[in-house]
Amino acid sequence: MNLVIDVGNTRVKIALFEQLEIKHQSVFLKEDLLKEVEVLVKKKKIENAIISSVGRITKKELKRLGTFFPLLVLDNKTKIPFSNLYKTPKTLGVDRIALVTGGVNWCDTGVLIIDAGTCITYDYVNENDEYLGGAISPGIRMRYKALNNFTAGLPLLKTASPKNIIGNSTKNSIHSGVVNGVLAEIDGVIDQYKQLDENLTVVLTGGDTNFLAKRLKNSIFANPNFLLEGLNNILNFNITND
């Protein structure tokens, strides 16, 4: 079995893969990483593992994890199954590398991967498995927080679907502005990419996948586990090409 570890700023997602199928999945706080992995190792036979971290993880933690199984630490030097044409490859986040790898293995057409999480990232890989880049914009929660942080009188609200495009109160106006703004942005970006690639496949992933998927006008494939699957693909690629 392959173990995939995705370390965020506060939480960690892990998944156990048997070939391409997820057999186990869990989410926990970052400080519980070693404890959770130790428990898992006692229950499951893990042959190889990969870790991707956008949050801080210490060398001591990595060394400890490496005592449990062969561990691949994803960075910009890791072997990947696509041509990276990004002009600043060293600044490309490991999460985006994993998402693009997932796109390469998803289908034979050009793929736009939209990750709706803390930030909304757009990553495009063409039919020749060439990664060209994309975009980064604020995510839904970041937009709500920005309205509260950078103004004197606007409240911090929980994410909610607006009842109408016209907000008839301050709260409804915020919901309309944030949610409809995000939807208009995503649909608009998809439309622009379709003008560049008429055979485009669009994948939506990330924490806000379920909230956004049915509200978008464009046809998309919703897959909340796309990053985890991409990490597993990178691990398998490196095992095969080692």
Image (cartoon, helix red, strand yellow):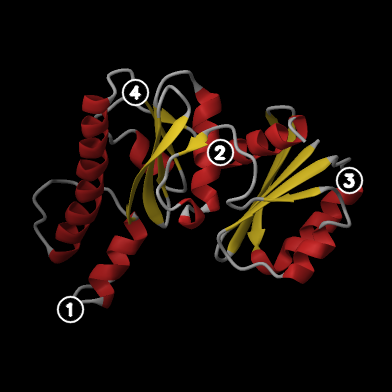
Residue at horizontal 27 percent and vertical 19 percent from the top: 198
Question: Do the numbered discs 3 and 1 sit on residues whose CB atoms are within 8 Å?
Answer: no
Residue at horizontal 55 percent and vertical 60 percent from the top: 54
| 1 vs 2, front mark | 2
State how far apart marks 3 and 1 are (Cα).
Answer: 52 Å
| Chain-order first, disc 4 or disc 2 | 4
10 Å crowding of disc 1: few (<14), some (14-19), many (20+): few
The quadrant in which residue 229 appears is top right
The quadrant in which residue 125 appears is top left
State how far apart marks 3 and 2 are (Cα).
Answer: 23 Å
| 4 vs 3, front mark | 4
Question: Do the numbered discs 4 and 2 sit on residues whose CB atoms are within 8 Å?
Answer: no
Label 3 SS: helix
**Disc marking residue 43:** 3
Say left or right for 207 vs 197: right
10 Å crowding of disc 3: few (<14), some (14-19), many (20+): few
Image x and y of residue 55, in percent: 57, 64
Kind of residue indicated by mark 1? Gly
Label 2 SS: loop
**1 in relation to 207, above or below:** above
**Disc marking residue 225:** 2
Question: How many numbered badges does the structure rendering display?
Answer: 4
| Chain-order first, disc 3 or disc 2 | 3
**Disc marking residue 200:** 4
Kind of residue indicated by mark 2? Asn
Query: Which of the image's four quarters has the C terminus?
Result: top right
